[in-house]
Image: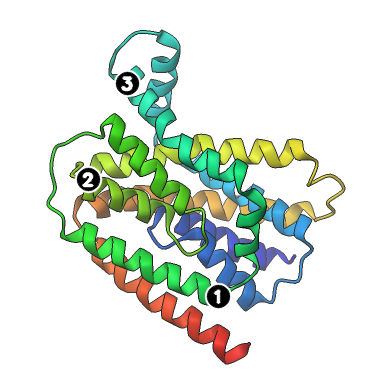
Amino acid sequence: MEVIDAIFLGIVQGLTEFLPVSSSGHLEIAKAILGDTSVPEESLMVTVVLHFATALSTIVVFRKDVADIFRGLFSFKWNDEFVFSLKIIISMIPAALVGVLFEEELETFFGGALTFVGFMLILTALLLWLADKAKNTGKPVSYKDAFVIGVSQAVAILPGISRSGATISTSVLLGNDKAKAARFSFLMVVPLILGKIAKDLLSGDLTGTSIEVMPLFAGFTAAFIAGFAACTWMIALVRKSKLSYFAIYCFLVGVVAITYEYAFA
């Protein structure tokens, strides 16, 4: 992989991890456009590095919240931090179960099927449009809401379904405050990303992978910077109810993806 390709993929990953436009869907489209011919192990290594970069950018942006979560978990006192930590754990359960039980089945959706990605992006557009029309409230995320949002996160494993778009939209449609919904959405994914990275590293799938360090470093740096900027920007956009712009974007990209595969298949 060339350095310029790694930087491009890093920017795509960093921006689309937090903006509600589906990072996995955009990476599949980007790889198709770049004519990615890397072996599966190399592609997995790049994915692991880019996701670690965006997880790290989330931790930096929400460093105070992350510190509060850890204090809450290990204080063993029934305070706001401990309750929030429990909700994060509850939200992780659906995606963790789906990822473990259906890992092989899920991998079949990541083979460059742009028509599928396109239709999922159009579905994301619908979710964002509905959420944009919802009224803002001061309601916090409840335990039941946390589980339902977690189900949305599990569905968003599919390429083309935006994880942040699905979880924020679900939370807002459940009547939760938009700013709180965005904060919860970004924090709930960090343990899952780190857990997935640990699983990939411990599984041995990356053993013997030969890929140059410079492209990985360039991609990591690009993903971290883009992720930091997108995460900060997205919080402000959700608060101001600007999701309809992303709905239009996802719809257009979905149509382009479907058209591209039919035109160049």
- Looking at the rendered structure, the secondary structure element under dot 2 is loop
Q: Position of residue 195 (x, y in %)?
A: 59, 35
- Name the N-terminal-most of marks 2 and 3: 3
Give how far apart the Cα atoms at labels 2 and 3 are. Answer: 19 Å
Pointers 2 and 3 in contact (C-beta within 8 Å): no
Q: For the C terminus, which image quadrant?
A: bottom right
- The amino acid at mark 1 is Leu
- Name the N-terminal-most of marks 1 and 3: 3
- Extreme residue toward the bottom, this view: 263
- Looking at the rendered structure, the secondary structure element under dot 1 is helix
Q: Which residue is mark 3?
A: 83
Q: Is residue 189 left or right of residue 208?
A: left
Q: Is residue 212 left or right of residue 190?
A: right
- The amino acid at mark 3 is Val
Quick check: can you spot residue 190? yes
- Looking at the rendered structure, the secondary structure element under dot 3 is helix
**Where 104 falls versus 255 (above or below)?**
above
Q: Which residue is mark 1?
A: 114
Q: Position of residue 163 (x, y in %)?
A: 43, 52
Q: Which residue is mark 2?
A: 174
Q: Position of residue 81 (x, y in %)?
A: 33, 20
**Where 250 falls versus 14 (above or below)?**
below
Quick check: can you spot residue 60? no
